[in-house]
Image (cartoon, rainbow, N blue to C red):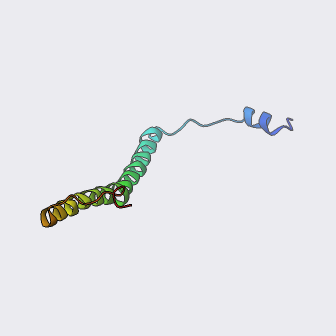
Amino acid sequence: MATDLLEQLSRSEVPPPPDEFDRQFHQRLNQSLLFGHFVELAFRAIPFAFGFFARAVIGLLVLSLTGRFPPTSKEAR
């Protein structure tokens, strides 16, 4: 009788994976990736794009109303 755990595990019978194992695994993985991409798009990419566009629109309004370019962060110092 083997007393070492690894020896016992090496002698034990391992059943084959189910036929649908790969398909189920990939479906769960794809759902997780899709959710992660959606969250990143909703909470990172869209607010960044909106903020970047808003800065451009505000700059256009300032230029239209005052006739001068709005100061950049380096010029404001």
Residue at 17% over, 60% down: 60
Report the side of 61 relative to 38 (left or right).
Answer: left
x, y (%) of residue 69? Answer: 21, 58
x, y (%) of residue 2? Answer: 85, 35
Of residues 50 and 41, which is closer to you in this image? 50
Of residues 50 and 8, which is closer to you in this image? 50
Kindly indicate the quadrant of the structure image that contains residue 64: bottom left
Report the side of 68 relative to 4 (left or right).
Answer: left
Query: How many numbered circles does the render carry?
Result: 0
Residue at 80% over, 39% down: 5
Q: Is residue 71 above or below residue 29?
A: below
Kindly indicate the quadrant of the structure image that contains residue 35: bottom left
Of residues 5 and 44, which is closer to you in this image? 44
Report the side of 20 relative to 73 (left or right).
Answer: right
x, y (%) of residue 39? Answer: 38, 57
Of residues 16 and 6, which is closer to you in this image? 6
Specify the farthest residue to the bottom.
65
Q: Is residue 24 above or below residue 60?
A: above
Looking at the rendered image, the quarter that the N terminus falls into is top right
Looking at the rendered image, the quarter that the C terminus falls into is bottom left
Report the side of 51 relative to 65 (left or right).
Answer: right
x, y (%) of residue 6? Answer: 78, 36
